[in-house]
Image (cartoon, grey):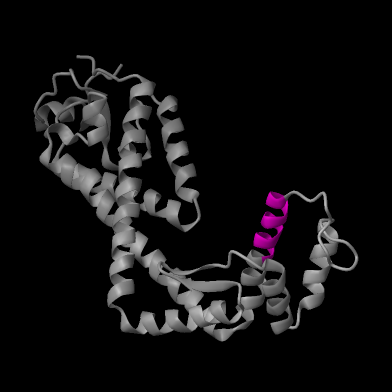
């Protein structure tokens, strides 16, 4: 009996839908976890206060109702003070000269566009934050702690999201359907062509979760997803990496999946064309 192999487009759409849902919930849950840590961690609160002191002392940032934000007026005055504070005023003067927005005496040229000038000032604030503030231990401590907590929060969110969409939902659905498979009318079977075992969802979850988390770390996960999708073109069963590892295959939703029979499975795989 032939197994109903779905079109590549449906396979792609199914995976794309699942990945978008996973990333969406990952970032929502990650931000929620991050917010809880910010609001409940006393040690982080103290570190964050010292971190914000550096920004305020530079005069490039100010207190607002929503916390700390970039100044909105007197950019040149504040930037001059900030670069002088870190003994780097000559760098700011060099940047002004190279911008061609200023006269030799430091005044602004008449034909300079206001938006271009504003963008120049913002770039100098970014330069100060990237290159000057990092010499302050209070700033480095805050950046390190914030980066570490953010990474941990989103990793937890990623595992939770993958668990929901790639393990929990398929476990309680018939034939291992994810939301993407249900929308595109696809099902999951054993690579032999018979009904899959629930345990086969576990290696799929582990591989998928690992690739998703690698997206957070350095973007390698995106390439893994691309390679996995390309592999389905190279075999007659259209199996991706996680299919090979879990011994599963994706089939058309309308295909009549037979219960697993050990004696039948030992005779050989059902024809997959």
Q: Does the magenta stretch include residue 123?
A: yes
- SS assignment for the magenta stretch, majority: helix
- Residue 121 x/y as whole percent: 69, 62
Residue 109 in the magenta stretch? The answer is no
Quarter of the figure with residue 198? top left
Residue most extreme to the front? 110
x then y, percent, for residue 172: 11, 41
Which of the 4 image quadrants contains residue 246? Answer: top left
* Residue 23 in sight: yes
Pick the residue in front: 260 or 267.
260
Residue 134 is left or right of residue 188, and the answer is: right
Quadrant of the drawing holding the C terminus: top left
Q: Position of residue 197 (x, y in %)?
A: 14, 39
The relative height of residue 161 versus residue 190 in the rendered view (above or below) is: below
Horizontally, is 117 left or right of 180 in the view?
Answer: right
Residue under the image location 23 percent in, 35 percent down: 179
Among the 4 quarters of the image, the one containing residue 122: bottom right
Magenta range: 114-124
Q: Nearer the viewer, residue 8 or 70?
A: 70
Residue 200 sits above or below residue 116 on the image: above
Image quadrant occupied by the N terminus = top left
Q: Residue at the location (33% across, 73% down)?
A: 38
Which residue occupies the extreme right position in the image?
104
Residue 143 placement (x, y as % from top left): 50, 74
Residue depicted at 50% across the width and 55% down the height: 218
Which residue is at the far top? Answer: 1
Q: Is residue 226 above or below residue 256?
A: below
Residue at image x 27%, y 28%? 250
Q: Nearer the viewer, residue 205 or 212?
A: 212
Regarding residue 86, the answer to whether it shows in the image is: no
């Amino acid at each position: 009996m032939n197994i109903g192999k779905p079109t590549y487009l449906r396979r792609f759409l199914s995976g794309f839908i699942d990945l978008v849902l996973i990333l969406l919930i990952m970032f929502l849950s990650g931000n929620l976890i991050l917010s809880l840590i910010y609001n409940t961690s006393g040690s982080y609160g103290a570190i964050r206060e010292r971190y914000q002191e550096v920004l305020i002392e530079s005069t490039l940032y100010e207190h607002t109702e929503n916390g700390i934000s970039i100044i909105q007026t007197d950019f040149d005055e504040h930037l001059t003070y900030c670069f002088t504070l870190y003994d780097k005023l000559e760098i700011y003067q060099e940047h002004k000269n190279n911008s061609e927005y200023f006269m030799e005496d430091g005044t602004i040229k008449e034909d300079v566009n206001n938006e271009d000038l504003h963008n120049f000032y913002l770039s100098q604030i970014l330069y100060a934050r990237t290159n000057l503030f990092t010499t302050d231990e209070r700033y480095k401590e805050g950046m390190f702690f914030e980066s570490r907590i953010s990474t941990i929060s989103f990793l937890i969110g990623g595992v939770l999201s993958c668990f929901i969409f790639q393990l929990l939902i398929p476990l309680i659905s018939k034939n291992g359907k994810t939301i993407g498979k249900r929308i595109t009318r696809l099902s999951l079977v054993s690579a032999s062509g018979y009904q899959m075992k629930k345990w086969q969802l576990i290696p799929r979850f582990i591989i998928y979760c690992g690739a998703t988390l690698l997206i957070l770390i350095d973007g390698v996960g995106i390439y893994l997803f691309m390679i996995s999708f390309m592999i389905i073109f190279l075999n007659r069963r259209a199996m991706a990496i996680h299919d090979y590892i879990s011994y599963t295959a994706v089939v058309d939703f309308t295909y009549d999946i037979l219960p697993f029979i050990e004696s039948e499975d030992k005779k050989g795989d059902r024809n997959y064309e």
